[in-house]
Image (cartoon, rainbow, N blue to C red):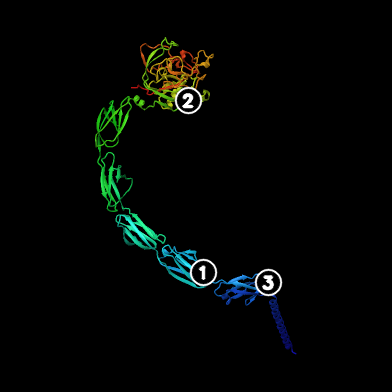
Amino acid sequence: MSQFNNKLDKAQNKQKRIYILSGLVVTSIILLIVVLIIHSRGTRIEVMPLEASDQATIRAIDNFSFNIGNVVYSLSGNPTINVSSPGFKDATENIGSAYLGKNFSLELAELPGHLVISIVGDKDNLLETVWKINNRDTTRSAMLDLELEAGIYTINISNPFFLPKDLTVEIKRQKKTELHVDLQPINGRLNILTRPKGAKVFLNEELIGKTPLESNLNGGVHSLRVTADNYVDSIDKFEITHTVPNVKRNYQLARIKAKVIPKLTPKGGRLIVNGSLSKGPLFLNTNEEHQFIYMKQGYYPSTKKIQLTSGKAREISFQLKPEFGKVIISSSPPATIWINNKNYGKNSVTVTLPAVTQKILFKKKGHRSLLKTINPTGKFVQKVSVKLLTEYQARLQESPRELTNKEGIKLKLFINPGYMKMGAPRSQKGQRANEFQKKIRLTKSFYASIFEITNGQYGKFKPSLRKSLGSDDVPVTSIDWNEAASFCNWLSMNEGLQPFYKIVNERVNGFNRNTDGYRLLSEAEWEWLSRKAGKTKQTIFSWGDEMVIPPNVANVSDESAKGQMKFYVPNYNDGYVSAAPVGSFKKELSGLYDIAGNVSEWVHDIYSIMPPIEDTTSENPLGAENGLSHVVKGANFRSGSVTALRPSFREGLTTGRDDVGFRVGRYLYGGKNE
């Protein structure tokens, strides 16, 4: 055999072996599948409903499962299948272990249908349509467009402008159902009244008549315009609905206003329009009469009436005429007359003045100037007659009878005190040689402090001493006369009054008797207050002529001082062994407290033992301007003798003492009363 034939035989044998081997493999696989089918559990798939089952396609969709027909085999685990059928939604399910080798039911859901319902009519009125499907709200819109499962449905259509409507609709799967519905409109009624009557009514910009008007309307949103000549249009919107089918309107139309431009000469006056003061641009009703009054002080007023016939601006002019008035002016006593800072001479004057506010000033030396304000008029002659008061008369008229000053000191006013005889006769029990009798006349009204000056009040003047002075309500003592005078000047400066005392280097070296500043009471004033003020006659003691001291009258040397003081008042107890708080005892007839006792008091006068000139009357005596010592008046808590208890008792001291204080006073007016 040739070499070629040998090779051909070898190739043929090799091919035979390949065919035999492939056949064995295929046969093994088939046998393996048959074995697997025999040994695996097949699960029968039942598709529901029957309509879906007839055309259902079943597929095993995982790697270790397969199906033959409607039977699914799984080589491992739980198989997953996909089932589809025309007209139904695909379903993918995992077959649980409990169903392997058994029947597994799978129900397919039908595909939805498409429902479209539109309403015939104005779309603006349809936007509020409420749709209900089987009594459940779905949407609010002009039309219904949605998918529904196959079946029969009740559709409710509700719109505020139409009568409600119900529909029954059958939905088929994968089918579009389209409906057009014509709703029946609501029948409503419109009633319109206006003032004025006869106004034109435009409904949805279409003229429907004049007021009063009634009209039938279908449901919906409507626009309304009411118009009348010379009146502002009234524009409105309203709805006719099944809940509010009837609409009533009552319009009070406002007149069209026209602008009025005033031209006023002179400027700066008052323009009254229809009884009210104009305060800005004028816009007034047309077809109506209006009254204008223009007035200005010094001019005659002018009145005009106009009627505005259109809405156009209109000017109105005023040219006022000046007004003058005649005035007769006089005063008593005759004084210089100044009118608006111009001197018109003395005595009576007759002048013609513009009818504006005029200031008339009356001046006379020694008298309080008087200012009068008048408004002359051309309607009649005015008379201005005044009576001038002296400065004293004016102050007396305006000054309170009692007052409290800035430092809390209470004062009482004593007006024109009058005559008195100071001192005591030689025959009077307890009289001393220095108690000269002399006639005095007090013509100047003065204030006197109701209480003695206290530690608290003096401490405001000397703050450095306040802690060492003692209780605030007890009279200040142990200060000399110069310190008391300095306190008076301090009070004056605090109230803007001219100081009474002339002080150099803390020493008084004179005084100004013509000032109303604070000072110490004069000896004459002090004795008058004690013996005559508030009484029908002059007395020996502050409480009267009897030597026996009435209860609770004064703080003096009483029974408690027996054995300690040389003199004391028997059978009298005042409750204090030293100075008492001011005002602790009865108010005296003068209206003051503690004149009769408590502490003795510095007075203004220089102490002198020179007897007065006989048969002379001293007027408002203040004594000399300089001297070594000053007078101390009045009893104190150590006084127990008849001599010391009498107000005519007087001492001369140069230094302070612990039983000597003071009270203050001042003239109402520094000059003469007249």
The residue labelled by disc 1 is: 148
Q: Secondary structure at mark 3?
A: loop
User: How many C-alpha atoms fall within 10 Å of the one at disc 3: few (<14), some, or many (≥20)?
Assistant: few
Label number found at residue 76: 3
Up-down: is 315 above or below 355? Answer: below
Up-down: is 307 above or below 613? Answer: below
**Residue occupying the point 31% across, 61% down:** 209
**x and y, in percent, of residue 554 in the image:** 47, 19
Tag 1: residue type? Leu
Image quarter hosting the N terminus: bottom right
Sooner in the amino-acid sequence: mark 2 or mark 3: 3
Sooner in the amino-acid sequence: mark 1 or mark 3: 3
Tag 3: residue type? Ser
**x and y, in percent, of residue 354 in the image:** 26, 36
Farthest right residue in view: 1
Compared across the picture, whether 353 is left or right of 629 comes to left
